[in-house]
Image: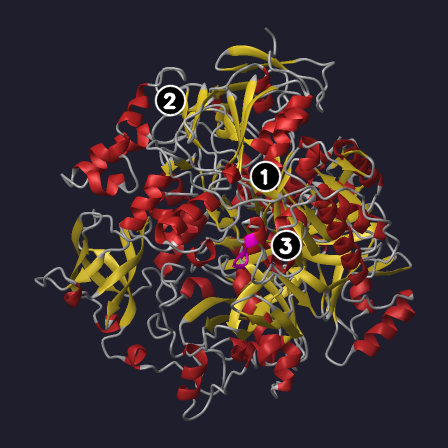
Amino acid sequence: MIINHPLLGPRDATEFVYLGDASMIERPNGFGEDVADAMYEYVYLRDNPAGEHRELWYHEQGDRSWLVVTRNTLTHEITEVALARDVARSKGRSK
Amino acid sequence: MADITLIAAPVLGGFNHEFSNCTLAERSDIALISVAVPRDGDTALSTKLDTAWTLTMPTPSTTTQANGMRAIPLTADQFLLAFHPDTNRTEVSVQDDLAEVGYTTVQTDAWVILELSGEGATSALERICPLDLAPDAFPTGSAARTVMEHLGAMIVRVDNTRFWLMSARSSAMSFLHAVETSCRWTAS
Amino acid sequence: MNQPNRVDGGQIDRATTLKFQFNERWLTAHPGDTLASALLANGVRLVGRSFKYHRPRGIFSAGSEEPNALVQLHKGAALEPNTRATTVEVFDGLYATSQNHRGSLEHDFLAVNDLLSPLLSAGFYYKTFMWPRAFWEKVYEPVIRSAAGLGRLSGKPDPDEYDHGYLHCDVLIIGAGPAGLAAALAAGRAGARVILADEDFRMGGRLNGETYDVGGIAGADWARSAVTELTSMNNVRMMARTTVYGAYDHGIYGALERMTDHRADSGDKPRHVLWRVYSKRAILCAGATERSMAFGNNDRPGVMLAGAVRTYVNRFGVAPGRKVAVFTNNNDGLRTADDLRAKGVDISAVIDARKGEFVVNTTGRKGLKSVQLNTGRKIETDCLAVSGGWSPNVHLSSHHRGRPTWREDIAGFVPGGELPPGMTVVGAAAGTLTLASTLSEAHETATRIAMDLGKSRATGEAPKARDEDFSTAPIWHINEGKNRAWVDLQNDVTTKDVTQSHREGFRSVEHLKRYTTLGMATDQGKTSNMLGLAVMAEASGKTIPETGTTIFRPPYSPVPIGAFAGRARGKNFRPTRLTPSHAWASESGASFVETGAWLRAEWYTRPGEKGWRDSVDREVKATRTAVGICDVTTLGKIDIQGRDAAEFLNKIYANAFLKLPVGKVRYGLMLREDGTVYDDGTTARLSDTHFVMTTTTANAVLVFRNLEFARQCLWPDLDVHLISTTDAWAQFSVAGPKSRALMQKVVDDLDLSNDAFPFMSCAACTVFGGTSARLFRISFSGELAYEIAVPARYGDAMIRAMMAAGEEFNLTPYGTEALGVMRIEKGHVAGNELNGQTDARMIGLDKMVSRKKDFIGAALLDRPEQTREDGLQLVGLRPVDANVNLTAGAHFLSPGDPEDMAHDQGWMTSVAYSPELGHSIGLGFLKRGRDRHGETLRSFSPIRGQDVMVEVCSPHHIDPEGERQRG
């Protein structure tokens, strides 16, 4: 596969490491009362769609960017690639 | 222990070999300092690079060069400064120059640098480098990190037929073997 | 007579004569010959024996689709079985032998199988060899395996080299026949970067085998001029002898280039290069493959595809027979007679199936003698050229599951469904079976694709030619006569096998294929799939499109496993990482152990030491009584800088890091989000904004990845930056009561007294009069210890200087084994304990885990399994009988309990012999272990056959109060 890196252009998927569902970005606060349920969902529950999937890829043999790649799991068509840092910020993550 | 002084040794013993259509040599005369750009600190850092060496920040895939200083992109917010150290410009002096505007780390010893030059360089690289090195796709000054023979590597086109190939120092022997095999197998 | 079957013409170099051997017989050939054309030129008709029935077989085709003429090339280790004689280029000295016969090719004892054929039909072994059950593995299978099959492997390591490579282009053109050449000319002239690949050594495809005109000259001459023009373009890469074998995602194609197979001497260059081709667009110009018809005894040597007969006579100047008969269901086949007559070859008959005339049987066991027609006519002939029509080579078009669609007018499947993105199919592969249409289609398609890619230079006119008459009738199976009619020559599948499997209920094509093995040989049924489908359609009374088609998967034709492996063989299987002291260690008697990619010294053998234990015991004793040195460069080192670096570490580690003072080191415990221990190590604070983290050797890369994840995805606005410095510093652990004295000698101007530089201190310093260094007072062995780091370029000088400086203290190098012994003595956990199931409670570090902050792993610390009362806890173990050596992996049982999982109390994780204590010691996990010190248990290992009594104790076997390391 080829991933069109937002900063570097098309790069072979062999340069990347796959993590999984991009919902891993949306980590709930892990401190305080009643966080266990939210964290349980975050750690253990994933969708496994046959079709469009937003997923995390790490450009380990490259610029070390984490990317959010929108990929069709049936055809491998990739329709969008974004820097995970930008996605994280758009979800309200900061410090 | 004044009677003992430590002598630096190039990791490949200064390897240098001419093949029929390219030359492969270890460059052990280059100092490397990584510079991380502090958050919201781009302006201060680029101003400092400009005043110190009239150097501009590299782009994600292009190096910049001025006054014997070359900036090579590493990550979205980090680059390497590569230079030939002398009495006026040392690892320490460059780190001092940037102390207020960037986070620096000496990287000289983290890498091995192989210089591959000659007309046959791109044919040799075809066997190990997955990147498109055609002159319009990867013109002089381009830099990219990729993987060659299972090793993380950086490739810089310093001239039309001259490349720097950089990889981790600890696996320098394996990296040399990979590049050298490519040179040998594509030699005429 | 020399080459008795040579006729005029052909694209061979008659001025040069090559000598080669077939079955120990010296024969001659010319450059440009394949082994098949050379054998035919020499009158060799019988070249092999069939897979199952050991029937005599000859050359059937003239290309990579060949099912019959499989031979072994070369001798000794280089022996290569199952090579298609039709694709092997002859060179001087080529050595080839036939295969799959016992005794000689002419007198194969296993030909008896042919007489047993009623027993050997589809599924015969499932039915026949059912009883007695035990016979299957011991008798039936070995006998069947040795009787059936192909060539033999040499059994020796492959002496050849193989390489990989990467190519990039705008347009990849697959196949250099008329379509491929026309497409390449157009795309090349437009200015696109083109790769033109063809499996043949001579580009031109069918143009080389036919007598068509293109642009007013002979097709083969036009092909040669097109190749000349393309070769002169520097934006076109011409790749003959290159098979594009697979279509992968996003325009990536796999291609195998045969570099040296056609040479007697490889010149120490790789035999094959497996290319990964990155293309923006691809044009599939793979042409079509001719198929046969099924009639009685249609497998005899001398029965050949009509197009192949034309190829031999036109391209190679070889007449495959003296008196040739033609049997065809289409007009293309009729050309064969004209082409042969033009070369002066006798035509014994032209049998046009469309006129109701069929071949029903043949004679001639080792070479065709006659054919029998349904009309009762018998024709003497030594070669029958058969054409059952042409099947478009759709293979690569279906590699992404696109299902071919049926076209009635050409009686064939054409590419259908979703093609691989970026692929266009033109010419015969797309069902355009005539020349002029193919050329213009290819030209126009390539011009349009080049335009799409922004290349708009003029591409000129499409080459001119005539569209030949190509009318065909779907006649497949000559159902007259009682003799066996072959569908799949390579796997010996007959029409009876197909109809029988249909009778037995195998209705799906995919089931038929697997039950009969139709199309599953190394030729993947290129000449037989269509025929099999037609026979099945006939049996089921359905149409061919209703019956369906199988889809194709890579590779298009066989690719040697060696080519996939490339250079990754032996010691080059993966990269090796060497520590800075490696050369010195090699000189000093070290044995090395692989830890990941690293080679680390495991112990240093001294003269007189009889085994590794002698060396390890000595190293441990020396370190504990004087001073030892160990290269610890392999531990991951990560430079962490930024205004928020402390805040970041506080989120990463389970223990507190915000207030770590500058100049201090702290042990850090890293958890996974589910609360399991992930990694541990020490982190030093060099300034307010600068930390150096160490990780375990094994997890260095993974920890770095996780830190980047945390930095970019979880807390994207922290000012924190990471860079690996693992390779940048040569780091040595210096441990033992005399380590301070030694370090005082080595380090310049730094007060190392316990007050000035206590346990868990760190400092930047210089050593040996000015070399920059970092000094850490940390201890894994439990002794007074330091770690000293110098830039890696000084690593070799440093170990030599340290050894010189340490001579007066009896400085002893120690390896990973001694390191392991000392950490077990000290009760430090390592990989054996941190196995991905361990949490902080189990290793007694729960008090260290902060309850006042969020960090990775904070939320799930108190799951029921982790808080159960009888949870596993780290303990020390020692044998009740001091002479017993403990066994790692043994399980603990209370005395008297049965040996089952219900009574399992835990297990031994690590064991070592402690030279200081004089007996074996262990670490282990034991239920409620911390409360059970002093208890006696069974340590039971049924795998190792050990059942001994052990006493539970503190994991800190030595210096439990830590006085040594703090002293």
> Bounds of the magenta span?
C399-408
Nearest the eye: C408 or C303 = C408
Q: Nearer the viewer, mark 1 or mark 3?
A: 3
**Residue A75, disc:** none
Q: Chain of mark 1?
A: C
Disc marking residue C252: 3
Location of mark 1 (residue) = C583
Q: Which quadrant: the N terminus of chain C?
A: top right
Query: Which amino acid type corresponds to the residue marked 3 in the rendered image?
Result: Ile
Q: Earlier in the sequence, mark 2 or mark 1?
A: 2
Front-most of C939 and C325?
A: C325
Identify the residue at the far bottom of this view.
A33
Please give left or right for residue B142 compared with residue C689 in the image.
right
Please say whether residue C118 is one of the residues in the magenta stretch. no
Residue drawn at point x = 15 percent, y = 66 percent? C903
Measured from the top left, where is residue C455 in percent x and y?
Answer: 84, 58
The question of residue C407 being in magenta is answered with yes
Label 2, secondary structure: give it.
loop
Location of residue C958 by image quarter: bottom left
Whichever of callouts 2 and 3 sits on the residue coming sooner in the sequence is 2
- Dominant SS of magenta comes to loop
Q: Is residue B128 left or right of residue C488?
A: right
Would you call the spot at circle 2 few (<14 residues within 10 Å), some (14-19), or many (20 or more)? many
User: In this view of the protein, can residue C758 be seen by the observer?
Assistant: no
* Percent x, y of residue C205: 67, 37
Q: Give the secondary structure at mark 1.
A: helix
Q: Nearer the viewer, mark 2 or mark 1?
A: 2
Q: Nearer the viewer, residue C174 or A69?
A: C174
Query: Can you identify the residue that label 2 sits on?
Result: C101
